[in-house]
Amino acid sequence: MKKSLRKAVIAGNWKMNKNRAETKTLISELKPLVKNADCEVIVCVPFTDLETALDAVKGSKIKVGAQNCHFAPSGAFTGEVSADMLKELGVKYVIIGHSERRQYFGETDITVNKRLTAALAQGLKVILCVGELLEQRELGITGEICSMQTKIALTGVDAADLKNIIIAYEPVWAIGTGKTATAEQADEACGIIRSTVASLYGKKAANALTIQYGGSMNPKNAAELLSKENVDGGLIGGASLKAPDFSAIVAAASL
Ligand code: 13P
């Protein structure tokens, strides 16, 4: 982290976990534990929990995000939710391009770009996920993959909108597997993403961009990952479902 240059952000991605009662409980447990956080704290919850979460975080610095949104404002897109609908609820953040969306739901770099652009147009802040598959890492093309995903996702995005974007580097082989990228691997990939952004928007803009690491981040490995210059926070899956674990990661980012 380089807090003199950019904001540290710890975000929980609850994925398809927690009903409304559980959402209330987890947020009420988290509130006192993160009240002195010196970083931004976000929880990205299932669509059905958004309203409950928005109500539960009142009086705290915890922000609420969704995990996806569609690019059209409305229409015949069964099962989808638009950026306008999220905005109307009072949601401030949305994850776009998570690898589980890419792997299981046919999301492509092009639809990621469309969703990201639609979210920004509605004034939402976006957590854009990029990252390589294990085979791609083994082929030595991690940098190219992250750079390509970043470039396509940001196509048509104005420099002025960069402040509304966080990029999460999530190597797919590290997600939910217990295998964490080493701090050096995370720093290197986040650095490549930053250079890609610099080539598009200039060094100053790239230096101000928050880039998170995500993939089996937990209270044990968080401090080391966050000690790296290019790792400005975390996007946390499994460990975000338990208040003591998530708050320990928030504490590691608050040093
Ligand atoms: P895990 O922390 O469970 O590996 O999940 C990471 C992730 O996908 C966050 O978006």
Image: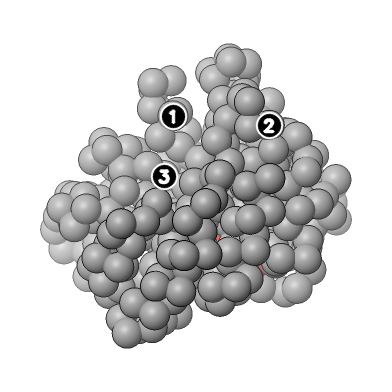
Answer left or right for 210 relative to 70. Answer: right
Amino acid type, residue under disc 1 in the picture: Lys
Depicted 254 relative to depicted 198: above or below: below
Where residue 5 sits in the image (x, y, percent)? 61, 25
Cα separation, mark 1 vs mark 3, equals 10 Å
Kindly indicate the quadrant of the structure image that contains residue 134: bottom right
Viewer-nearest residue: 55 or 19: 55
User: Residue sitting at 14 percent across and 58 percent down?
Assistant: 75
Crowding at mark 1 (Cα within 10 Å: few <14, some 14-19, many 20+): some
Amino acid type, residue under disc 2 in the picture: Lys
Where residue 237 sits in the image (x, y, percent)? 57, 68
Residue picked out by circle 3: 126
Res 196 label: none
Among numbered discs 1 and 2, the one appearing first in the sequence: 2
Where residue 42 sits in the image (x, y, percent)? 45, 55
Among numbered discs 3 and 2, the one appearing first in the sequence: 2
Quadrant holding the C terminus:
top right
Kindly indicate the quadrant of the structure image that contains residue 6: top right
Residue picked out by circle 2: 2
